[in-house]
């Protein structure tokens, strides 16, 4: 199977549908069915984070991309709260679009800082200036990362600060291929990028499970395989682009009404 952007997104939304369906109907499922459904669902989030970084790299207008994520975060909050909290618009737990938007904003700032620093670091330039710019950039990067993690944690977005960390991991790990000329020539630049992205996800799984003291997120290991074998192509989209944005609030709303009808709550 050719794993292009279209296929990767279909895999992610199907895994998410299984995950959210499992949560919605947990009272009707056996313990084994519930655990299996949640395990399948762990594949979705790493793929979404990977696609955020891919979107950052390839989109023609990053600000419009960020605005789309922000708009669907707001649109999705009502359905999200109905399904997960049984009330319309509560503000203790926010949907995953907020996490993805904060993560994208963070890597936009990191990328801009790196670009500006690169412009000013001319070979043979003033040594003091080079040191100062390098130090400023070195300080700015962790400030952006920690600020983004703080906001996600403060507003309790889905996956919160750990979600931001995954996007950051993928963003930085993909840059490692720049320093591996021999491997790039052998494997190809994109292939190496995706291998490093897979390594970033694997490391994140380990950190997440250590943090919570249980092997939970590592069940999403198929995401690593899909990312590593992603071919970097857009693919032939058989569904409108906005379907993948609208699917999130629509499937959550559908699950909420199905639960009301079948389970009575």
Image (cartoon, rainbow, N blue to C red):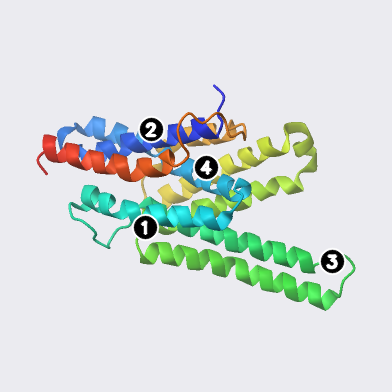
Question: SS at mark 4?
Answer: helix
Image coordinates of residue 73 in percent, x first then y, are 38, 54
Q: Residues within 10 Å of mark 1 (few under 14, many from 20)?
A: many
Counting residues from the N terminus, which is met first, the one under dot 4 or under dot 1? 1
Q: Is residue 183 left or right of residue 4?
A: right
Counting residues from the N terminus, which is met first, the one under dot 3 or under dot 2? 2
Distance between mark 4 and mark 2 Cα atoms: 21 Å
Asked if the residues shown at circle 3 and circle 2 are in contact, with their CB atoms under 8 angstroms apart, the answer is: no
Q: Is residue 185 left or right of residue 79?
A: right
**Closer to the observer: label 4 or label 2?**
2
| Residue at 21% over, 53% down | 85
Distance between mark 3 and mark 4 Cα atoms: 36 Å
Dot 3 corresponds to which residue?
122
Question: SS at mark 3?
Answer: loop
Counting residues from the N terminus, which is met first, the one under dot 3 or under dot 4? 3
Q: Which mark is residue 14?
A: 2
Q: Residues within 10 Å of mark 4 (few under 14, many from 20)?
A: many
């Amino acid at each position: 199977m050719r794993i292009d952007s279209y296929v990767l997104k279909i895999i992610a939304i199907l895994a998410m549908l299984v995950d959210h369906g499992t949560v919605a109907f947990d009272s009707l499922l056996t313990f084994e069915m519930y655990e299996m459904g949640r395990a399948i669902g762990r594949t979705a989030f790493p793929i979404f984070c990977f696609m955020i970084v891919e979107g950052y790299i390839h989109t023609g207008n990053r600000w419009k991309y960020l605005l789309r994520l922000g708009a669907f975060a707001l649109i999705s909050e009502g359905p999200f709260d109905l399904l997960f909290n049984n009330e319309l618009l509560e503000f203790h737990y926010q949907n995953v679009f907020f996490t993805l938007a904060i993560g994208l904003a963070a890597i936009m700032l990191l990328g801009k800082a790196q670009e500006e620093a690169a412009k000013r670091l001319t070979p043979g330039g003033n040594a003091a200036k080079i040191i100062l710019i390098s130090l400023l950039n070195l300080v700015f990067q962790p400030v952006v990362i920690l600020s983004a993690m703080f906001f996600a944690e403060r507003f309790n977005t889905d996956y919160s600060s750990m979600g931001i960390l995954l996007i950051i991991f993928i963003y930085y790990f993909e840059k490692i291929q720049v320093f591996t000329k021999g491997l790039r020539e052998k494997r190809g630049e994109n292939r190496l990028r995706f291998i490093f992205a897979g390594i970033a996800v694997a490391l994140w799984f380990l950190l997440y499970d250590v943090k919570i003291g249980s092997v939970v997120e590592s069940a999403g290991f198929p995401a690593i395989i899909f990312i590593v074998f992603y071919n970097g192509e857009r693919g032939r989209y058989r569904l409108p682009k906005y379907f993948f944005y609208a699917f999130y609030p629509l499937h959550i709303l559908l699950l909420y009404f199905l639960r009301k009808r079948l389970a009575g709550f």
